[in-house]
Amino acid sequence: MFFLYATLTAFSVGFLVTPILISFLKRFNIGDHPGGRKIHSSFIPSMGGISFVIAAAVALAIWGWQFPLPDSRYILGAILLMFIVGLRDDLVALRASRKLLGQLVAVLLVVVVADVRIRGFHGFLFLGDFHIVVSYLFSGFVLLALTNGFNLIDGLDGLAGTIAVISFACLGTWFYFQGVESYALISFTFLGGVLAFLAFNWHPAKLFMGDTGSLTLGFTLGTLIIAFMEINEGLPQDSFLKFEATFAAGVALMMFPLYDMGRVFIRRISQGKKPMSPDKSHVHHFMMRIGLKHDQVALILGGLQLSIIALVFLMRDFSDNLVLPIIVGISMFLGYRLDTITVKYLKKKVAMQPRVLEVRP
């Protein structure tokens, strides 16, 4: 019941704070205007991440006092720093180099100071533990990739929030059963805050999370996933909910953001563009082109994310060498089918339209 109360506290605070935040942002005209790559048709306040960060902070302050502070103080400090980076970028756009510098400081707090890092492949590809320098570099790279991969999917009403809710719920439940209560509390308080935010972000959205929210959520999820992987690897062989496929379980929790990021980067590079150059080549853009609505896309992609997690759970007694190629292969096949269906739909739509010379006044 303790963690249920913490979740309800965060949800209540978020639900009460969010309408105030929306009014404040509208008053000062802080948000996204339609046009360009934007797929909404009217002004929508942004920086909604403020609401669930406040909600999680209040819930942590109320319910987290009984846990030893050294367990999580550096992680919470790094999350706060990432929140400030996102807030600054939403208010006044940061240069990419300065934005990356702020992210690197937050990553250093987690990987080096808090010592939350990936220590090795644990048998995946038949490789063992890393040298400590390799461990720091690889963990930092993974955490940055997870953070920015999640940031890239925040382009549709309810999508990023839905993926976050699924991952936080899974992580919080697993940490709870393993007795890692400080991490479970972080997961459940963010779960409550994001659920409250989703009530205002679901289509038609009244509020966007902005970089303030997407960077914070991506970084928090990335940190907890790395912690999950290392704690899981240290469990005795016959422990409850131990995953033999440690890497596959970690990837499954962020499968959609990672797939979308890889797909978009490969597509842009093949077209001679920079990997971070904005366009409309994301998975959710393709699904919108075939006539699906915001809420339909969010539910379908959330359902697929949950299905991948369920598959890894069912195969938890098998190794990464089997499970990871399976879930990656499934994701690539589904992406290929989506591209094929979209191209066929658009060709059919174009063929049905009258030719320019056939149009009468």
Image: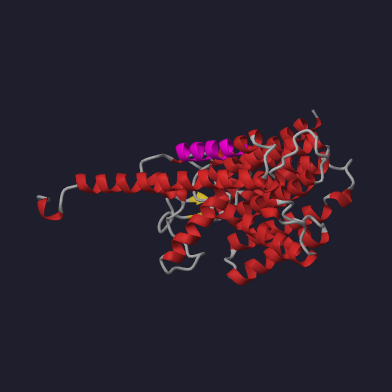
- Residue 89 place in picture, x, y as percent: 60, 62
State the residue at coordinates (67%, 69%): 101
State the residue at coordinates (72%, 33%): 8
For residue 145, what is the image quadrant?
A: bottom right
State the residue at coordinates (66%, 54%): 125
- Residue 267 place in picture, x, y as percent: 44, 60
Q: Is residue 56 above or below residue 262?
A: above
Which residue occupies the extreme top position in the image? Answer: 1
Q: Main secondary structure of the magenta part?
A: helix
Q: In the drawing, does residue 121 fall left or right of residue 149? A: right
The total of numbered circles placed on residues is 0
State the residue at coordinates (31%, 44%): 345
Q: Is residue 29 visible?
A: no
Q: Is residue 62 visible?
A: yes
**Residue 307 is a magenta residue:** yes
Magenta highlight range: 295-309
**Residue 131 is a magenta residue:** no
- Residue 7 place in picture, x, y as percent: 73, 35
Q: Is residue 85 above or below residue 293?
A: below
Q: In the drawing, does residue 211 fall left or right of residue 138? A: left
Q: Is residue 140 above or below residue 19?
A: below
Q: Quadrant of the N terminus?
A: top right
- 102 or 34: nearer the eye? 102
- 344 or 128: nearer the eye? 128
